[in-house]
Amino acid sequence: MSLIEGRAVCRYFGGVNALANVNFAIEKGSIVGLIGPNGAGKTTLFNVMAGTIKPTTGRILFHGEDVTDQPAYRICRKGIARTFQIPRPFGTMTCLENVVVGIINNLNGPYVKSDVEDKARIALKFVGLGDLIATEARNLNVVQKKKLEIARALATGPEILLLDEVLGGLNTQEIGEAIEFIRLLRDKQNITIFWIEHIMGAIMQAAERVIVLDQGTVLMEGTPREVVSDQRVIRAYLGE
Ligand SMILES: Nc1ncnc2c1ncn2[C@@H]1O[C@H](COP(=O)(O)OP(=O)(O)O)[C@@H](O)[C@H]1O
Ligand SMILES: [Mg+2]
């Protein structure tokens, strides 16, 4: 059984078919890339998987269980966490507080403050922000903000992490380090990775399989090598 599966997922926004009959399956322990031109529906697919928006029709199955109608916090608690394409941390809150809020938001119930803070500290340390837990988020640089965004997602204890263009704004060396880090998440933490990225080189290095979306439909899927040499993919990116 796949870890997570989408069946005939459609999402319409007025006249726009952001997702039109999308089928996909992600195996546990894999790193899968999700690529496609701007407006292809990638972020919408993540929103649907995380439960923050509901599909117009179609189902999302996690461990074979239909989670389509469940609220986002419950989907998160089951083990699906996502980062946002544009991180918006609370600037005047510390790193620790930002991660704590991320955990509490997805609990929707009573909690022990010290336990939550412990989880937040572990996640911050893991992403390399251990020395900055008391620093206000507004004082972080772009790399640190990305790390905070990942820590916020990791602290919820996900089985699968949905990464939405986390490499944007990083330089070549930082991208290399981020790729290593994402591999580590899978290898050492056993977290399955579903990763939207427009930097093809990064996907080529890290992903075992790539799904290509175009205009709300799956154009193709395959190994990174198969995908970049596919005429349909090249056409989708470059236009006719
Ligand atoms: N909340 C929304 N309301 C209206 N249209 C939306 C909304 N979210 C996405 N769309 C539209 O759906 C299409 C897919 O968007 P998106 O999923 O953000 O694409 P991608 O992440 O691949 O760039 C776009 O045409 C976008 O304008
Ligand atoms: Mg997007």
Image: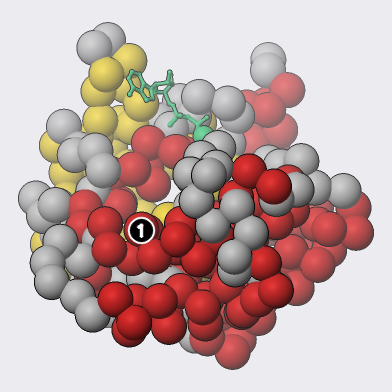
185 displayed left or right of 53: right
Q: Secondary structure at mark 1?
A: helix
Task: Give me the residue at 37% from left, 36% from top.
Answer: 44
Above or below for 132 versus 170: below
Estimate the x, y position of residue 33 in percent, counting from the top left: 58, 56
Closer to the camera, 128 or 68?
128
Estimate the x, y position of residue 52 in percent, counting from the top left: 26, 43
Q: Is residue 45 visible?
A: yes
The quadrant where residue 106 appears: bottom left
Dot 1 beta carbon under 8 Å from ligand 1: no
Closer to the camera, 212 or 76?
76
**Quarter of the image where the N terminus is located:** bottom left
Estimate the x, y position of residue 118 in percent, counting from the top left: 43, 83
Task: Give me the residue at 46% from left, 74% from top.
Answer: 120
**Quarter of the image where the C terminus is located:** top right
Q: Amino acid at mark 1?
A: Val
Closer to the camera, 106 or 99?
99
Task: Give me the residue at 27% from left, 18% from top.
Answer: 13
In the picture as drawn, the residue positioned furthest to the top comes out as: 15
Query: Which scheme is used to colour this image of the protein?
Result: secondary structure
* Other-residue count near label 1 (Cα within 10 Å), few / some / many at <14 / 14–19 / ≥20: some
Q: Which residue is mark 1?
A: 101
Estimate the x, y position of residue 103 in percent, counting from the top left: 33, 65
Above or below for 59 versus 188: above
In the picture as drawn, the residue positioned furthest to the right comes out as: 173
In the picture as drawn, the residue positioned furthest to the bottom comes out as: 188
99 displayed left or right of 22: right
203 displayed left or right of 47: right
Task: Give me the residue at 43% from left, 32% from top.
Answer: 41
Above or below for 60 versus 155: above
